[in-house]
Image (cartoon, rainbow, N blue to C red):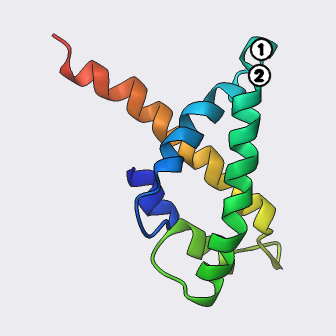
């Protein structure tokens, strides 16, 4: 997944696709879309990110998570929890954009 590379995952992570597919529905405000699989995926995603955040802090690269480790808001370091939430929004937003825009490009 391209968004995984942009976030700073060094190798393809199969879980990224699963996490995106199962958490994206949670963004709908209707309780009809709230489900245990999505919540479990959110927790798994959040649990995997602190290690990535810390590795980017000690060895930054040209990616979004590296930016998060050096960013400041009103002179205060960017909170790792905000970085995790932002990363999930980017992951889901990128997937939704791909799903909604690409099929239309190939239809006749």
Say if 97 sits above or below 63 in the image: above
Residue annotated with mark 1? 30
Instruction: Tell me the residue at 19%/21% (across/down).
Output: 106
Near-viewer residue (81 or 49): 49
Name which quarter of the figure residue 101 lies in: top left
What percent of the width, then of the height, locates residue 8?
50, 67
Q: CA distance from mark 1 to mark 2?
A: 7 Å
Position of 19 with respect to 47 (left or right) is left
**Above or below for 67 versus 3:** below
- Single out the mark in the foreground, 1 or 2: 2
- Which disc, if any, is residue 38? none
Picture coordinates of residue 17 (x, y %)?
A: 48, 42
For residue 20, which quarter of the picture?
A: top right
Rendered view: 105 above or below 51: above
Crowd band around label 1 with a 10 angstrom C-alpha radius: few (<14), some (14–19), many (20+): few
Residue sitting at 62 percent across and 71 percent down? 52
Residue farthest to the left?
Answer: 108
């Amino acid at each position: 997944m391209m968004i995984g590379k942009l976030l700073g995952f060094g190798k393809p992570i199969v879980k990224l696709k699963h996490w995106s597919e199962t958490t994206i529905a949670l963004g709908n405000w209707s309780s009809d879309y709230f489900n245990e699989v999505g919540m479990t995926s959110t927790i798994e995603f959040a649990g995997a990110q602190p290690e990535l955040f810390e590795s980017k802090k000690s060895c930054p690269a040209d990616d979004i998570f590296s930016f998060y480790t050096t960013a400041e808001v009103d002179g205060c370091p960017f909170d790792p929890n905000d970085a995790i939430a932002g990363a999930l929004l980017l992951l889901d937003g990128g997937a939704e954009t791909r799903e909604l825009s690409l099929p239309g490009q190939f239809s006749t």
